[in-house]
Amino acid sequence: MHQVNVAVLDDYQEAANSCADWSVLGADARVVFFRDHVADFDALAARLQPFNVVVAMRERTAFSAERIAKLPNLKLIVTVGTWNAAIDMQAAQAKGIVVSGTSGGGPKGPATVTWALLLAITRNLVQEAASLRAGGWQWGLGTELDGKILGLLGLGTIGQIVARFGQAFGMTTISWSHNLTTEKAKSAGVEYVSKDELFRRSDVVSVHLKLGDRTRGIVGERELGLMKSTAYLVNTSRGPIVSESALISALQNRRIAGAALDVFDEEPLLPSHPFRFLPNVLATPHIGYVSLETYRLVFPQIVEDIQAWFSGTPIRVLNP
């Protein structure tokens, strides 16, 4: 076998190597772990040109038809998760590139981060901790959740876990999505409502939709305009589901109380981005799936995917 070059992208924590045994790929595999993120199209194409296998962290790096065309040596893309909206599956298939996935890390990690962000922004935890660290004392007044309304935009596996968290804190839970039914909502102890009603009634709106053609930009100026001025938006799903420009405007003009965000249109977030500086924004760097347990599950599966492709019998194929 000729040498196969493997690129592991966005290994920010230098964790990929220690969370799996890459040596099983053998001496014919040269694995390179990249800690930095390259957003520039041409620069990234130049970096990845020698590689036959690329490991992509979620949808952070887009593999469009144009980018795929610039990577003549690419034969396998492995993505974390069972779907990736940033990969042009048809273009990959046309070029004979296999796309494999992993079973992911399960829904509990993102659901837990959702709840951590919700608690932190409603109780001003970041500001209070910063005040104490700076030598001060109490900073402001928080908002209790008991008796408030939690609106879940999407009631899939993650949304249902977040619903249970809300119910444990005494919140009334309501939900809407394109495919949700009254029966399914009721089985989760959630009230099914219209989309407009969800935005009007909720004290906290939490986004749990899958990114696709129907959901891209589904939360825009109109939806944000329906929200209470005291309400919060939490998004740990995907950035493009919420119109970034509409959300920035709503936050700058205090039309809503604040937003807690773990996902963005472009990741990593640009240094000058308003979400880094707006006082009513709590932003974290897409950590919903970033845990030791998830990495110890995902990276061995990635190695398995590459091994299977080596042997000519790819597994977990997403573009059959």
Image (cartoon, rainbow, N blue to C red):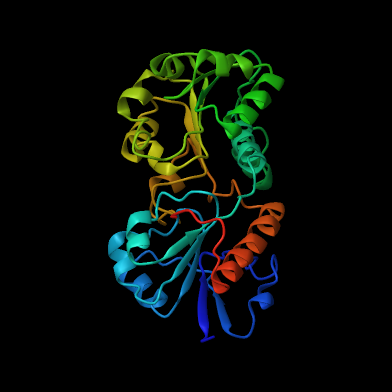
Q: Say if 22 sits above or below 203 in the image.
A: below
86 or 164, which is in the foreground?
86
Q: Is residue 123 visible?
A: no
Report which quarter residue 319 is drawn in.
bottom left
Q: Please give left or right for residue 188 compared with residue 275 in the image.
A: right
Q: Residue at 62% of width from left, 24% of height from top?
A: 163
Q: Position of residue 166 (x, y in %)?
A: 64, 23
Q: Please give left or right for residue 7 compared with residue 189 in the image.
A: left
Q: Position of residue 303 (x, y in %)?
A: 62, 67
Q: Say if 214 sits above or below 101 in the image.
A: above
Q: Residue at 35% of width from left, 77% of height from top?
A: 46
Q: Which quadrant does the N terminus fall into? A: bottom right
95 or 158, which is in the foreground?
95
Q: How many marks?
A: 0
Q: Is residue 2 visible?
A: yes
Q: Please give left or right for residue 35 compared with residue 215 in the image.
A: right
7 or 77, which is in the foreground?
77
Report which quarter residue 21 is drawn in.
bottom right
40 or 279, which is in the foreground?
40
Q: Say if 88 sits above or below 241 in the image.
A: below
Q: Say if 279 sits above or below 62 in the image.
A: above
Q: Position of residue 169 (x, y in %)?
A: 69, 21
Q: Residue at 57% of width from left, 81% of height from top?
A: 29
Q: Position of residue 70 (x, y in %)?
A: 30, 72
Report which quarter residue 271 is drawn in.
bottom left
